[in-house]
Amino acid sequence: MATQLRPDLEAEMQAIGRAARNAQRALADLPRDRKDLALRRAATALLAQSEAILEANARDMEEARAKGLSPALLDRLALTPARIAAMARGLEDIADLPDPVGIELARWTRPNGLDIARVRVPLGVIGIIYESRPNVTADAAGLCLKAGNAAILRGGSESFHSSRAILAALREALDSTGIPAAAIQTVPTSDRAAVGVMLRMHEWIDVIVPRGGRALVERVYAESRIPVLAHLEGNCHVYLHAAADPEKAVNVTLNAKMRRTGICGAAETLLCDRAIAKTVLPRVLAALIEAGCEIRGDDTVRRIEPRAKAATEVDWATEYLDAIIAVRVVAGLEEAIAHIERWGSHHTDAIVTEDREAAETFLRRVDSAIVIHNASTQFADGGEFGMGAEIGIATGRLHARGPVGVEQLTTFKYVVRGNGQVRPL
Amino acid sequence: MATQLRPDLEAEMQAIGRAARNAQRALADLPRDRKDLALRRAATALLAQSEAILEANARDMEEARAKGLSPALLDRLALTPARIAAMARGLEDIADLPDPVGIELARWTRPNGLDIARVRVPLGVIGIIYESRPNVTADAAGLCLKAGNAAILRGGSESFHSSRAILAALREALDSTGIPAAAIQTVPTSDRAAVGVMLRMHEWIDVIVPRGGRALVERVYAESRIPVLAHLEGNCHVYLHAAADPEKAVNVTLNAKMRRTGICGAAETLLCDRAIAKTVLPRVLAALIEAGCEIRGDDTVRRIEPRAKAATEVDWATEYLDAIIAVRVVAGLEEAIAHIERWGSHHTDAIVTEDREAAETFLRRVDSAIVIHNASTQFADGGEFGMGAEIGIATGRLHARGPVGVEQLTTFKYVVRGNGQVRPL
C-alpha cells in the first residue's frame, strides 16, 4: 500500500477542520427536504457508480491480500453489488426518519414574561474514525447529514480506495442539491498520524466517534482532547434468577450468546442462581454446547456439566466475541448485581425471571446503558429500539448512552424571547 | 500555608475514588425523602456550626492576607453569618426541587412486544474543582446529592480550612440520615498535584466540573481524561439591529453590561447596525458612559462618541469582566452573526429588534448555548431560567449546554421489559 507521507499534514488537517465548520453552519440551517433529497440522490449515485466502487474495492482487496489480512478482515473489507445496494437502502431509510433539528424539547414562560425554549440543534462537526468496513463511509455520512452535522471521516487504510469511491458518489449528491462538499470530507491520507492530529482538533471537531476494535477505541480515549462517543467493549451478562422460566432461560441465553457472536450486544457471561443450578442450568448448558458453544465454568458448573472447561478471573473480564461463554453460579440477586458491577462494561445486561420484584430491582440497580428483563441482549441495537440507523452504541455516561442514532447526533440550545426585560439588581 | 506533601497521594486519591463509587451505588437507589431530609439537616447543621465555620474561615483569611491576596479574592473567601445563612437556604431550596432520578423520559412498545423506557439515573461521581469561594462546597455537594451523585470536591488551597469545616457539617447530616459519608468527600490535601491525579481518575470519576478563572478551566480541559462540563469564558454580545426599539436598546445594553460586570453572562461587546449608528447608538453609549463604563470602539464609534478609546482585534476577543465594553458598527444582521461566530465564545448572545423575522434568524443561526431576543444577557443563569440552583454554565456542546442544574447532573438508561423475546437471525 502506498502510504503517503505528508510533511504538511497538520496544515492540511486544519484546513479540513475549518472547511467542515463552515459547511456545518450552512447545514444547520437547511430545511428537511433538502437534506432528504441529498440522501436519496446519494443512494442513487451509489448504485449508479457501483462499477467504480467495486473496482476501487478490488484494489483494496488486492493490497489487503498481499499484506496477508485474515479472512475475517477480508470479508469486512469486501464490497459486492448486494452490499452496495444495502448501503443505498440505508441512506433511503435515513431520509425517511423524522428531522430532529429544530424540535422544541421544552418551552415555558417565566413570571417576568421571558419565553424560554430548549430547541434541538445539530451537534456540529463529527469526526469518525473507523476500521476496515467501507460501508461506514456511507452510513456515518448519512446519519451526520440528516442531523445537520458535518462529518470528517477517517477510514481504515485498508479501505482507502473504496472509501474514496463511495465518497465521490456522496459528493455528487451534495453538489447536485447545493450542499457544500465540505459537509462530508475524508482525511486525504492513509498516514496513521492523521488520527493523532484529528484527536487534537478540538477547535473544529465537536465529538469523535471511533468504530472498531478495542485497540482503536483505547487509543482514541487515551489521546482525544475531544469528547468521545463509543464503547470500549460489550461484556454483556445474562442472569438466570431462581424464578426463571426454564423455556425462556434456554431461548434467551442461546439467542443472546449464539445468534451472532461477533456483535457488541452478544452475551459473554452467564450467571445462574444456585437454586436452579441443578434444574434449569443443565438444560441451558446442553443447548449451548449443542449449538457449538464452549463453556468455561466455575467449580459448581463443572460438576454439573463435565464438558465445561475451568473459568478463571480472566474469563469474567473477557469479551470473547466468539462461541465461548463464561458461566458462574451465584447465591442470588445481590451476588449477580455485584458480579456485573465488578466485571461488566456497562453495556447491556439481562435478567431472566418470572419474579417481577426481582426483575425491577435488577433493572433499577444494574448501572448499564441497557438493562433487559426476559429478552435477548442482542436487541441492543438502534434499529431494534425503533430509533433507526445508529452510528454505534455508547457506554459513556454523558450525552448519548446506548444506541447513537440521529437524535443523539444533536444537542440543544436555549432560545429566550423577551420584550425588553432586564435583570433586577 | 502548610502545604501537605504526600508521597502516597496517588493511592490516597484512588481510595477516595473507590469509596465515592461505592457510595454512589447506594445513593442512586435512595428515595427522595431520604435525600431531602439529608439536605435539610445539612442546612440546619451549617447554621448550628456557624461558629466553627467562621473560626476556620478566619484562619484561611489570615493566611490569605499573609500571602497578600487581592481585596477581590479576600472578599470571595470571606464568610459571614449572612453568607452561611445563604448557603443553608440554598440547601433548603435544593431539597424543594423535584427529584430528577427515576423519571421516565420516554416509553414505547415495539411491534414484537418489547417495552422500552428511557429512565433518568444519576450521572455518577462528580469531581468539582473550584477556587476560593468556600460556599461552593455546600452548593455543589447539595446539587450532587439531590441528583443521586457522589461528589469529590477539590477547593482552592486558600479555602482549605473553611471547606473542611463546611464538610464536617454536611457529613453530620449524612451520618444522621444513614447516607454513606463517602457521598461527599474533599481531597485531603492542598497539594496542587491532587488536581492532576483527579483528572486522570476516569475509572472513578464520571464528569469534572471546574469552577473558577480561565487558567483553571484551561488546565482542566488540557489535562482531563474525564468529560468536562464548563465554560472557558463568556464573551457575550448585544446586537442592536436596525429595527431596535431605542428604549429597549438603552435598557438592555446597560443592564447586560453594567448590572454586574464580573459574571459570565455580562455583555462584553456591543454590535450596532450602521442604520441606527447616529440615532440610537449615541444614546446607548452616553448611558453606558454615565454609568461608569469605558467604551472601546471602531472608527465609526469614535466619530460618534469622542470619549471612546480605539478598539483593536484584541478587544473583540476579550472577556473584560469589568466596566469596559467593545463597540463595533456592522452593516447588518449577516455581519453581526459573522462577528459573533468569529469572536464569540458560544455562551450567551442577544439581539435587540422589533423585526420578528430578523430576530428569528438571529436566534436560529447564532450557535450559542443561550440566544436571546429583547432581553438582557444577564438572565443567563439557572435560577433565572426557573431551573433552580446550578453548578455553572456549560458552553460545550455535549450533554449539558447552558445552566448545569440538578437535571443536567443526571443521565439515563434504557430499561427493556420483555416476555421471552429473542432476536431473529
Image: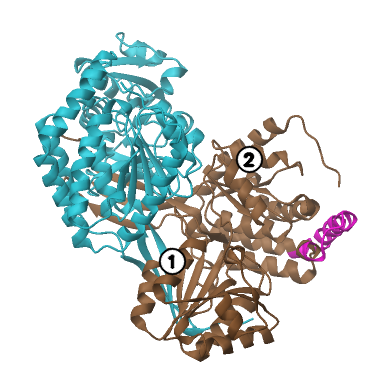
Chain colours: A brown, B cyan
- Where is residue B224 shown, x and y percent of the image? 49, 38
Query: In this orientation, does residue A356 appear?
Result: yes
- Where is residue A329 shown, x and y percent of the image? 51, 77
Q: Nearer the viewer, residue A294 or A234?
A: A294
- Does the magenta-highlighted stretch encompass residue A52? yes
Label 2: how many residues lie within 10 Å, few (<14), some (14-19) or many (20+)? many
Amino acid beneath label 1: Ala
Count the numbered circles shown. 2
- Where is residue A248 shown, x and y percent of the image? 51, 87
Specify start and end residues of the magenta stretch as a single range: A47-73
Q: Are marks 2 and 1 on the same chain?
A: yes
Query: Is A114 placed above or below A260 here?
Result: above
Residue A37 found in image quarter: bottom right
- Does the magenta-highlighted stretch encompass residue B343? no
Query: Is A115 placed above or below A105 here?
Result: above
Camera-side mark, 2 or 1: 1
The C terminus of chain A - image quarter = top left
> Which residue is denoted by mark 1 in the rendering?
A338
Q: Main secondary structure of the magenta part?
A: helix
Q: Earlier in the sequence, mark 2 or mark 1?
A: 2
**Label disc, if present, on residue A198 of the rendered structure:** 2
Tell me how far mark 2 sits from mark 1, CA to CA: 38 Å
- Where is residue B391 shown, x and y percent of the image? 30, 42
Query: Which chain is home to disc 1?
Result: A
Q: Nearer the viewer, residue A19 or A238?
A: A238
Query: Is B8 placed above or below B356 here?
Result: above
The residue positioned 62% from the left and 85% from the top of the image is A305
**Label disc, if present, on residue B20 of the rendered structure:** none
Tag 2, which secondary structure? helix
Residue B120 found in image quarter: bottom left
The residue positioned 39% from the left and 78% from the top of the image is A359
